[in-house]
Amino acid sequence: MKIGIIGGTGSIGKGFALRWGQKHEIIVGSRDQKRAEDKAAEYKQILNDRGFDADIRGAVNREAALEAEVVVLAVKYSKVASIIEQIKPVLENQIVISVIVPMEKDRCTIIPDSGSIEIEATSREDYMADYFCYTTPPAGSAAQEVASMLPEGIELVSAFHNVPAAKLSNLDISLDYDIGVCGNYMHSKNIVFDLVKDIPNMRPVDVGPIETSSMVESLTPLVINIAIRNQKKDIGIKFVD
Ligand SMILES: NC(=O)c1ccc[n+]([C@@H]2O[C@H](COP(=O)([O-])OP(=O)(O)OC[C@H]3O[C@@H](n4cnc5c(N)ncnc54)[C@H](OP(=O)(O)O)[C@@H]3O)[C@@H](O)[C@H]2O)c1
C-alpha cells in the first residue's frame, strides 16, 4: 500500500514511516522538497540497517497526497486547514487518516498537603503546575473539522491519537497499546485496522463513527497529564475486560 505522510518530517510522522516502511511504500511529505528527501533518506537508512529493503521517498505534501492510497495528516491542528487547502485538488479516492489532537498547555495552582495556607503573592509561582487540556474545535473534534474541509466522497478515519511519537519511532520498543479507530466507512476503517495490526502488539478498537472522535482525541492530554504527574514516560492506552 502507498502511504503518504503529510508532515512526515515531524515526530509522529517519523514513527509511522519507520513502522509502516517495513512493509509498505512510504512517501514522506513536507512543505520543502529537500527536507522531505533528507528525512526519507534518514528513515530508509534506519530500516536498511535493520535488514528491511524499505521503499521510502520524499516529496512535497501535495505530491505525497497525489501519489498515495492512504494519506496521513500528521501536522498540528493549527496547520491542518492550510494543508487541506493545498492537497484538496489532488484528493480523489484516497483514504485520509487524522491523528490530530487539538490541545494546549495551561497552568493552575496546586495547594500543598500542609492545608489551606495563604499563598503569598510572591511565592505563588512555587505552587503553579502545568497541565494539558483538550481544546474542543467548533465542529466537536479535529476529525470532524477535517471532515468538513475534505472534498465530498473522501473517506476519513480518525486514529492513532494516543500513541507517543518517541515510542512509535523507537523500533526496539513493542507497543502494547489499543488504538481507537473512528469513522463512518467500514471499508476504510478495515484498512486502518490492518495498518494498526502491522505494528507489532498494537490492537485496533472500533470506537464508532467520526462523531466519537473527540472522546479518543481527548484521551491524549489525559495520558500526558498522568505521565507528568506520576513520573512515567510516554504512556499509551490499553482497555482491559
Ligand atoms: N507527537 C506525538 O507524540 C503525537 C502523538 C499522537 C498524535 N499526534 C498528532 O500528530 C500531529 C503531528 O504532531 P507532531 O508532534 O509530529 O508535530 P511536529 O513534529 O511539530 O510537526 C509535524 C510537521 O508539520 C509540518 N509543519 C510545521 N509547521 C507547518 C505549517 N505552518 N504548515 C504546514 N506544515 C507545517 C512540519 O513539516 P515540514 O516543515 O517538513 O513541512 C513538521 O515536521 C499533531 O496533530 C499531533 O496532535 C502527535
Image (cartoon, rainbow, N blue to C red):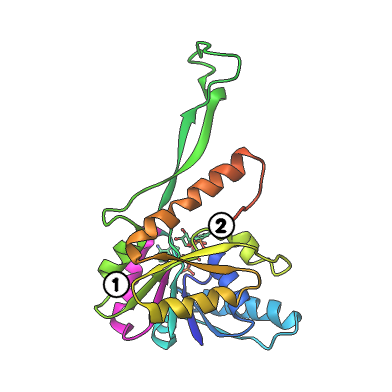
Residue extent of the magenta highlight: 77-98
Q: Amino acid at mark 1?
A: Glu
Q: Is residue 82 left or right of residue 161?
A: left
Give the residue drawn at x 65%, y 73%. Answer: 200
Say if the magenta span includes residue 88. yes
| Residue most extreme to the front | 241
Give the number of the mark in front: 2 or 1. Answer: 2
Is ligand 1 closer than 8 angstroms to the Cβ of mark 2? no
Where's the C terminus, which quadrant? bottom right
Q: Which mark is residue 85?
A: 1
Q: CA distance from mark 2 to mark 1?
A: 36 Å
* Callout 1 secondary element: helix
Q: Residues within 10 Å of mark 2 (few under 14, many from 20)?
A: few
Classified by dominant secondary structure, the portion drawn in magenta counts as helix
Task: List the residue tagged with mark 2.
Answer: 239
Q: Nearer the viewer, residue 69 or 107?
A: 69
